[in-house]
Image (tube, rainbow, N blue to C red):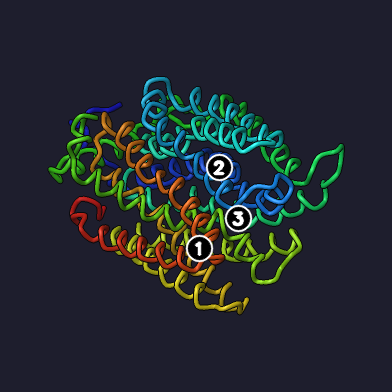
Amino acid sequence: MATLSNANRLPDAPQDQAVLENAYKKVTLHLIPFIFVCYLFNYLDRVNVGFAKLQMLDALKWSETVYGLGAGIFFIGYVLSGVPSNLLLHRLGARKVIGTLMIAWGAASACLMFVKTPEAFYTLRFITGVFEAGFFPGIVLYFTNWYPASRRGRIMGLFMSAIPISGVLGSPLSGWMMQSFAGHSGLAGWQWMFLLQGIPTILLGVLVYVLLNDGITQAKWLNPKEKELLLLELEDDERKRRATNATADTFASVLRNKNVWMLGLVYFCIQMGVYAINFWLPTIVKSLGFQSAVTVGWISAIPYFCASVFMIWVGRSADAKKERRWHLSGPLLMGLCGLMLATQAHGNAVVALVGLSLATMGALSSLPMFWPLPAAFLGSAAAAGGLALINSLGQIAGFVSPFLVGWIKDKTGSTDLALYILSAVLFLGAMLVMRVPAKIVNR
């Protein structure tokens, strides 16, 4: 990498700017479509138990609490393995670690088709969480090797639009698989769904070894001038980050940094809403009177489609205005309003769907808006552990949220109280975001 003494040679000339923009287009086209597909299956494998639940509980005679615990126990393995996985990725490189993890979690997810007891369900969900833990924070870290802070909003928006699109595509697909394959070869529809969604993840893991480069200097598809300009941009970004005097440059300093812990709590609040929607949306839609798995799938896709469009727009707006805090707290407040509206629907399918769409748009769009915040003050030496720590703190919600909703539904027969609680959590997250100093993150 070029040294900071070269910072005065940043691409101010029009011809250099043109080369730089073309280089970023090449990077984005080479990385984002493939990583997007990988994340789509990552998220689909994480939440497809929400659809399997429509058949699993009756077939296996399980309670809502058993399901909620099984859905959530995934995140115990996820939280325990997040930091070690990312430190390993920082040492060995993204290509080797991410490829291996995808093969492993794809196999574990496919094996869910064989579960018969709650104990087997809990064990496989835990193992899947262990293997998936390194993927998302690893990709966030990976992007810091390619893009400066000023471009990460739109990139995270493009990348994380895989979440709602996994709902747009995955919901109808899951419903179709469960209905169309039911009974084939003696397997239930939910068993076929786990198998057919696990196999592509294994194949994508193999492709990671072939298609990904660990950084700019390894990219043979960039010419020397493009590499030079991209590296100078990253150096200038590092210099600006240090100028804020709010940096964390070692993992020990990460553990002492109050912003890291506060952002971990913010991410927890965000994920409480996100996972409630992901795991319970099909159930809520079914409770509105739609019984066919295919119909539930298509209707569940509507909120995710709205979120996929809104997410990309918010990311572009945040980068264009160089503003981060309101672009995060605003969607959180939208999610709050959507959940409140959904609880007041009283069986009205249209009102409930509008509320669920607003909630999904707000909660899911807050995810890509969150990650430029910690990346803005974590130094390169601290980013691997710091990003994974924040992600792990937030992912505790993946255990708490589905279990809380399932327990409340078992006790009250309704999800309304749970949605009120989740609305309050989203409000807390929005308020905490505004405590982050603007000068650190608005770049």
- Front residue (pair 138, 188): 188
Q: For the N terminus, which image quadrant?
A: top left
Q: Earlier in the sequence, mark 1 or mark 3?
A: 3
CB atoms of marks 3 and 2 within 8 Å:
no
Q: Residues within 10 Å of mark 3 (few under 14, many from 20)?
A: many
Is residue 80 toward the left or the right of residue 197 in the image? left
Q: Residues within 10 Å of mark 1 (few under 14, many from 20)?
A: many
Residue 392's spot in the image, x, y percent?
38, 39
The reply to whether callout 2 and callout 1 are in contact (CB within 8 Å) is no
Q: Amino acid at mark 2?
A: Gly
Residue 303 image-quadrant placement: bottom right
In three-dimensional space, the C-alpha distance between marks 3 and 2, rounded to whole angstroms, equals: 20 Å
Mark found first going from the N terminus, 2 or 1: 2
Task: In the rendered view, tell whether residue 175 sits above or below residue 218.
Answer: below
Question: Which is more toward the observer, 218 or 326?
Answer: 326
Q: Spatial distance from mark 2 to mark 1, Cα to Cα?
A: 23 Å
Name the residue beneath numbered marker 3. 167
**Relative height, residue 184 to residue 439 (above, below):** above
Residue annotated with mark 1: 360
Circle nearer the N terminus (3, 2):
2
Categorize mark 2 by other alpha carbons within 10 Å: few (<14), some (14-19), many (20+). many
Q: CA distance from mark 1 to mark 3?
A: 10 Å
Q: What residue does disc 2 label? A: 70
Residue type highlighted by circle 1: Thr
Nearer to us of marks 3 and 2 is: 2
Dot 2: what SS? Answer: helix
C-beta proximity under 8 Å, tags 1 and 3: yes
Image x and y of residue 10, in percent: 26, 41
Q: Residue at x 30, y 40 (%)?
A: 233
Residue 365, percent across and down?
44, 59
Q: Secondary structure at mark 1?
A: helix
| Residue 20 as seen in the image, left or right of residue 116 | left
